[in-house]
Amino acid sequence: MAEGEELAPLTDPGVQSDEEPVGFTIKPPARKTSLVKHPEEVVKRLIKKYTDDIQDRADWAEKRIQRTAKYRGWSEGKQFPWPGASDVHLPIIMTDVQRTEDTLHNAILSVRPVMNAKGANKDVEQKERTVDQLIDYQVFVENKGEVLMGNLISSFTQDGQYVAYIPYIKETQNATTTHVVEYPPAGQSWDGWILAHLQRYYPKGLVLPGARAPWNWVIKDQH
C-alpha cells in the first residue's frame, strides 16, 4: 500500500448484511415457559414464612428489649403507689455483666499468645512456636485483636450474642531449600555422592532416582 493511501472498507456501506457485526452481544434465546407455574402461590408462601418467623421471635425480641432496658437503667416513670414515686435504678444486671465481661477479657489477654499450635507429628513440632507467634501477630497487631476481642465480649455479655466476620484464606506456596554440595572426591561418582548427601538431609525419607538422574531425585516421606 502506498504512503497516504486509505484502507478501503471491508464491506460496502450501502449493502445490507445479515451477519452480526464483530463486537455485538448476541442474546441467548428467551425461555418460552416459566419454571414457576403459579407465581402467586410462591409469593404467598414466602410472605407467610417471613411473617411466621417474625412472630416466632416476638417473645425473644421483647425479652431482649427488657434485658437491655434493665441493664442500661431505662425507666418509664413510676405512678404506683402514688404519682411520682421513687424509681431508682438498681444496677444488679449491670454489675454482673461488667464483672463477667472483665473476667473474660482478662482471661484472654493475660497470656500471650492466646492460642497454641499443636504439631500433627514429631517432624513439625519445632515449628509450633513459630506458628504461635505468627497467629498472635496476625490477630493482635494486624487486626487490632485487643479492641476486637473487647467488642465481641461486650456484645456477648450485654446482648447474649455476637457476630464475627472471620474470612478464611488458604494460600499455597512452593517452599525451596537449597543445599550446596561440593564436588565429589576423586574416584567417586556423582550418583553416590549426591545420594549420600540426600540421605543425610532426609534421614527418614526414601530417596529414589528421578527421571533425570543423577540430577533429579524423588524423596518420599512418611508425612
Image: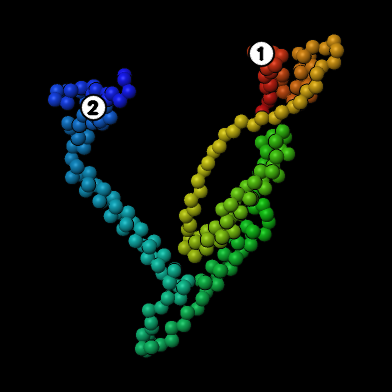
Query: Which residue is under mark 1?
Result: 212
Image check: 154 left or right of 1? right
Question: Residue 172: image x %, image y %?
Answer: 57, 34
Q: Nearer the viewer, residue 124 or 81?
A: 124
* In the image, farthest residue toward the right: 186
Quadrant housing residue 195: top right
Query: Which residue is under mark 2?
Result: 21
Q: In the rendered view, would you say 190 is above or below 164?
A: above
Secondary element at image label 2: loop
Residue at (76%, 18%) from the top-left corner? 194
Q: Report the quarter where the N terminus lies.
A: top left
Question: Residue 126: image x %, image y %?
Answer: 73, 39
Determine crowd level at label 2: few under 14, some 14-19, many 20+ residues with C-alpha closer than 10 A: few
Residue at (43%, 86%) from the top-left corner? 86
Q: Report the quarter where the C terminus lies.
A: top right
Q: In the rendered view, would you say 130 is above or below 77?
A: above
Secondary element at image label 1: loop
Circle on res. 95: none
Question: Residue 121: image x %, image y %?
Answer: 69, 34
Image check: 105 left or right of 188? left
Type of amino acid under label 1: Arg
Q: Nearer the viewer, residue 89 or 133?
A: 133
Q: In the rendered view, would you say 186 is above or below 182?
A: above
Residue 209 in sight in this render: no
